[in-house]
DNA sequence: CTTGCAATTGCAAGAAGTCGCAATAAGGAA
DNA sequence: TTCCTTATTGCGACTTCTTGCAATTGCAAG
């Protein structure tokens, strides 16, 4: 649990508290290694934390996202999803068949610099979702 | 209502029906000229269509988005928003103060071509939301 | 080890959004 | 105009997500 331990230490230094609920939710996300919905997280984490409520799951996921510990995304299935913030990436999803592709953030690096230069903003988004048609679905549609 | 008339004709040709509900919702969006939430649309449109239900508003907005007549976005206030699809643009929003900036799609044109080339997908998203810190808020935070 | 404060939780109510189904009605054909 | 097909609506139940508040509890200080 090295990663979770060091995250805990870091968060405690910021004045936040590491409750059993937070640790369990962090462990679920860390073990899954993929996008999970709040109800996925609730289902797994409540096995170890019997009294856990869904409201706490929602608040914890939002908290972890604000601290840049997890990434949040709308991937078009009507539910928010979360995952540990490890590699910087984005998603490209086919509107027709749902096929998805990861896009390395490096590809957007130049655009980000351009946007920062033009706007004066400091960009912090690092988990975009692009939609389109995959090579297979492109054929039938057009 | 030239624009709505021509949209109606176009949609009818595709086999869709232009109901009073759809026309009223389209007029609300067209008159507003800005992002509206489903409940904003419902509040305005139900003045002219007494029996209108929120479920119909949600379904109509989703329908119009799928037909590329309106653009949908999550702009970070917890509610979906919609607007007529007129100029292609994106949004850059300050996480701290909420200040927003429009970004012309032309700035992303090159990235889109790059992504399409690398993935084989045909990209259809044209209403992204970027988050960051505006020049003012950047100072205090860092 | 105790104590105390404020961060966090559970609870419960409510807002936001989705969906199946039967009734309605748009609009093309006759 | 009338008829027919089927897209669309209203309804109601349900899922997803948010929020105020009082009770709990992490954890730092003594
Ligand atoms: Mn991801
Ligand atoms: Mn917009
Ligand atoms: Zn596809
Ligand atoms: Zn700002």
Image: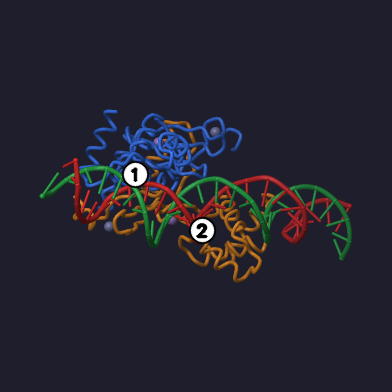
Chain colours: A blue, B orange, C red, D green
Q: Position of residue A8 (x, y in %)?
A: 26, 37
* Most distant residue in the bottom direction: B47
Q: Position of residue B3 (x, y in %)?
A: 57, 62
Q: Does A137 sit above or below residue B7?
A: above
Q: Residue at x 41, y 54 (%)?
A: B75
Q: Residue at x 63, y 64 (%)?
A: B52
Q: Residue at x 23, y 42 (%)?
A: A12
Chain letter, disc 2 residue:
B
Judged left or right of residue A140, residue B39 is left
Q: Does B23 sit above or below residue A38?
A: below
Q: State the residue position of label 1.
A: A65
Q: From mark 1 to mark 2, how far is it between C-alphas?
A: 31 Å
Judged left or right of residue B130, residue D16 is right
The one nearer the camera, B99 or B8, is: B99
The answer to whether the residue bearing label 2 lies less than 8 angstroms from the nearest atom of ligand 2 is: no
Chain letter, disc 1 residue:
A
């Amino acid at each position: 649990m090295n990663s979770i331990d060091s995250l805990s230490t870091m968060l405690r230094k910021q004045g936040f508290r590491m409750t059993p609920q937070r640790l369990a939710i962090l462990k679920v996300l860390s073990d899954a290694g993929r996008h999970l919905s709040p109800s996925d997280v609730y289902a797994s984490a409540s096995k170890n934390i019997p009294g856990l409520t869904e409201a706490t799951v929602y608040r914890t996921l939002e908290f972890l996202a604000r601290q840049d510990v997890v990434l949040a995304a709308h991937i078009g299935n009507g539910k928010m999803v979360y995952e540990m913030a490890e590699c910087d990436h984005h998603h490209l999803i086919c509107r027709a068949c749902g096929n998805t592709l990861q896009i390395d953030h490096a590809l957007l690096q130049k655009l980000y610099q351009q946007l920062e230069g033009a706007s004066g903003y400091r960009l912090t988004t690092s988990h975009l979702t692009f939609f389109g048609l995959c090579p297979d679905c492109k054929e039938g549609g057009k």
